Image (tube, rainbow, N blue to C red):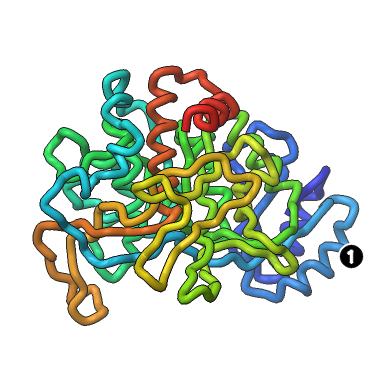
Amino acid sequence: MKSANIDAIGILSTLNKHKTNKLVKAFPYTKNEILKRVYRVELDGKLNDLILDINKKHKSEISEIKRIPKTEKIQVYDPSDYMWTSHKDDWLWHLVKINASKAWDITKGSWDTKIAILDSWFDINHPDLMNKISPHYDPYDLASYTTDCTENNHGTAVASFAAGETDGGGQLASIGFNCRIIAYQAHDGNYLERAHHASLAMNADVVTSSAGGWRCNNTLDDMERIAVKEILDNGTIIVMPAGNGVKIVNDTDTTVSTRCRPTGSAIDRPWFPLSPLYDERIIIVSSTDKNDNHIFKVDDTTKRIHSFYPEVDVCAPGYCLMGASCTEVDTCSSSTCCVTSGWPYYGCGTGTSFATPIVAGVCALMKTINPNITPAEVQEIIKKNG
């Protein structure tokens, strides 16, 4: 709900009439005059009746009412079985491929450099994350993280690729090395507000998201565009996955749900709302394999091709990467049946979900070297040197 000059008492009376249970500023940390006048309303009554009443009584005061669109609960990754080999280069081949050790000769990052990750659940007791995620709760709604095998621990894996414990007692090295992780749950409805909170309230240097309340369509929204621009103008780098494209079996194109292909489009497109269609400074990441191939041959009959379209900026390792998993296993689909899995708590995962936090970690190292570097400058450097 976007307001102009309002009769606060009259509008509150109308809202109460329709059983409104929540009225808050959508972007409480904004400096933008338009976003300052945007409010989120939740009610037990009928929304259509409220809209009719508002238009009848307060049309000159409320410039616009928008129903929050239904978003898709999407995770951009393809889970795989645990994979351990006897050769360390196989476990962490993605770090070898991007010459991480050369970057660490220049900087190992800093605790003051913050990567905000909007995702599903985070195992706060994982040895590679317990000292890297701070605070140990979602800063937006203050919900605490625990070890819970019944939750979707996609965020646990993603965090381990961005800035898991390195050279400090954990088991996995990570490109972000000493950088800090701020963990958000990417819920429907207030997804963009959480990204905005990460930048404006928590001063995150990088915001990345590999799962959450995204949507896939061709609809542009001016309020979303303004909010995205303010995040970037605040100096926060946004890194997003391109999508997981297609799976081809015996030369048959099999649609994969974790991609965005709007109705009528012949190619995959970026997700909304953290979309380069709002601001081209957003970095979009697709995947390559150990041999720099964009097409990954799974076996003699199956291959994977992760999404690629004009807005994609860079490809990073994204096929069969070793990442963190929950330190508990589920024995009966109930939290009462979660038992400690025992070491190792790692597995092989594939998807632009995992390529994306690797790039986010690289961005964090760049921010450590030059805190004043802009999102556009980071994007240009990555495109020229990636």
Where 2 falls versus 107 (above or below)?
A: below
How many numbered discs? 1
Q: Is residue 79 visible?
A: yes
Report the residue at 28% width, 37% height from top.
Answer: 96
Which residue is outermost to the front?
300
Q: Position of residue 95 (x, y in %)?
A: 29, 39
Where 115 falls versus 223 (above or below)?
A: above
Residue 49 relative to residue 245: left or right: right
Q: Position of residue 118 (x, y in %)?
A: 45, 50
Report the residue at 61% width, 44% height from top.
Answer: 27
Q: Nearer the viewer, residue 159 or 309?
A: 309
Report the residue at 36% width, 65% height from top.
Answer: 298
Label 1's element? helix
**Quarter of the figure with residue 225:** top right
Circle 1 crowding by C-alpha within 10 Å: few under 14, some 14–19, many from 20: few
Report the residue at 35% width, 68% height from top.
Answer: 299
**Quarter of the figure with residue 169:** top left
| Mark 1 lies on residue | 56
Residue 226 relative to residue 363: left or right: right
Residue 129 relative to residue 370: left or right: left
Looking at the rendered image, the quarter that the N terminus falls into is: bottom right
Q: Nearer the viewer, residue 355 or 216?
A: 355
Where 167 falls versus 323 (above or below)?
A: above
Residue 336 relative to residue 282: left or right: left
Q: Is residue 144 visible?
A: no
Q: Nearer the viewer, residue 60 or 14?
A: 60
Q: Position of residue 232 (x, y in %)?
A: 60, 33
- The kind of residue on which mark 1 rests is Lys
Q: Position of residue 378 (x, y in %)?
A: 52, 27
